[in-house]
Amino acid sequence: MKKFKLIKQSQEIIKIAAINLALLLVFLELGSLGWYFLKHKQFFYTRQKTQDKSALGINLEGVRLNQSIVERFHPFFGFVQKPSDDFRPGFKVNNYGFISPYDYPLKKTKKNQFIIGVFGGSVASNYGIFEVKNKILPGYLKQVPGLQDKEFVILSFATGGYKQPQQLLILNYFLALGQELDMVVNIDGFNEVALSNLNNKNKIDLAMPSIQHILPLTQLANNSLSVKAMKTTIRIQETKTQIDRGLESLQHCSFAACDALTSVYVQNLVNNYRKDTIAFEKERTKPQKDDGGSVIYINTNKSVLEDAAAFEKMAWNWAKSSIFMNKVLSASNVPYFQVLQPNQYYQTKRVFGDAEKEIAFNKDTPYAKAVEIGYPALLSKFPNLKKNNVDILNAVNVFDKTKDAVYVDSCCHYNQAGEVVFSNYVGRYILDALRKDERKKKK
């Protein structure tokens, strides 16, 4: 009898547990449906499925799923990304290490094609990707007489970490190879002060490529990368594999709860990836005590320059490089537009929300001081640039009227909303500048 009651009680407990579990799953699914709708502005079960992993709602900014985190030496450019046919839908890391749908040099296949070259660092590279996908600048250019029927082709010659005179050297290199350009947009300023400042602190010539990128490549070439850095590299590679698998699972979720839980899991992996890459950057950029046997030659300084002298030199390197880019292009009547990129560490009237502050600012970053001192130095060269007929756009205030968060990290990069504001700002400026030129020609 007691045994029968025990069995009956056990069945009741199992029944109650099953009901509670079912209710938990139902509420979890309902909560996940609401979370998905708030996040994606569409219902989970009627959603448009995508093969683009970057459109799954995970912030993958800075995650190089299909690339090594270490660049490759280039004898002319300093460094490039490793060529790969599998970067993201519609793009590849091309034969010269630039993110583009095309290999370079690209020859025109139609008379009405209009080729726009984009130069600069990672912000410029992101701008180029955004423009290829969204064609905001071409939308403005079509309002210019004579450009209405053009087929606009945007080519990115920008890579994360580039700073002048790399843009100048790359422009001349590709012009020498016969690359046709009808317009050039150069977006820079941040790397010129932030990365050049790191060069200075490590007694590396300011005009040399970024020590953040060159030093680890030098260490690899000399077989002197630290054990700690190599272990971090392996951990990063394992995390990337897990992220990729998680994104694959996310694409095939049949329930909203699966999507929610997998998203949290993948985003946590992405956060771990970012922490490890920061640790790797710190470790791999530690200077070596003795590089006398290095197979790579890098121009050095005997001492660290004082800030006033260093930033003045950085600003002149930046300005003169831009002036020469303009002179080269002007000889072929190619319009050149210089854009000083906005950055969170250069104070304007922008009001940052608490959530964006957490993302956009890092009290330990070496970039803050470099921008605070360096941007005024760059701005002081505007009169000289204009005197040399450089069409320069000061975009530091571009986000001042934007209430939405626009920064995705504590360096310099923008989210989708920021890219929209920035691209429209650049597009409107270029349209107005070309219209002014048209009016001058008619006088």
Image: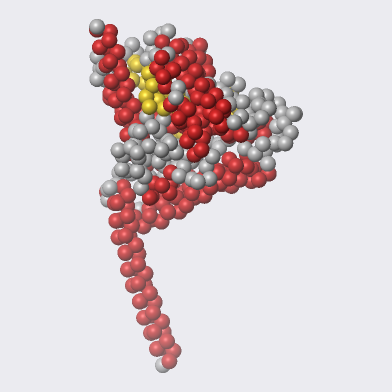
Judging depth in this view, the residue of 5 and 104 nearest the camera is 104
Judging depth in this view, the residue of 305 and 368 nearest the camera is 305
Q: Can the viewer see residue 138?
A: no
Tell how many labels. 0
Q: Classify 152 as above or below 37.
A: above
Quarter of the image for residue 26 reads bottom left
At a point 27% along the width and 10% down the height, the residue shown is: 440
Q: Is residue 398 left or right of residue 103?
A: left
At a point 72% along the width and 36% down the height, the residue shown is: 289
Where the N terminus falls, by quadrant?
A: bottom left
At a point 51% along the width and 28% down the height, the residue shown is: 192
- Residue 432 point in image, percent of width and height: 28, 20
- Residue 415 point in image, percent of width and height: 38, 39
- Residue 335 point in image, percent of width and height: 37, 15
Where the C terminus falls, by quadrant?
A: top left
At a point 47% along the width and 52% down the height, the residue shown is: 268
- Residue 161 point in image, percent of width and height: 52, 31
Q: Classify 344 as above or below 317.
A: below
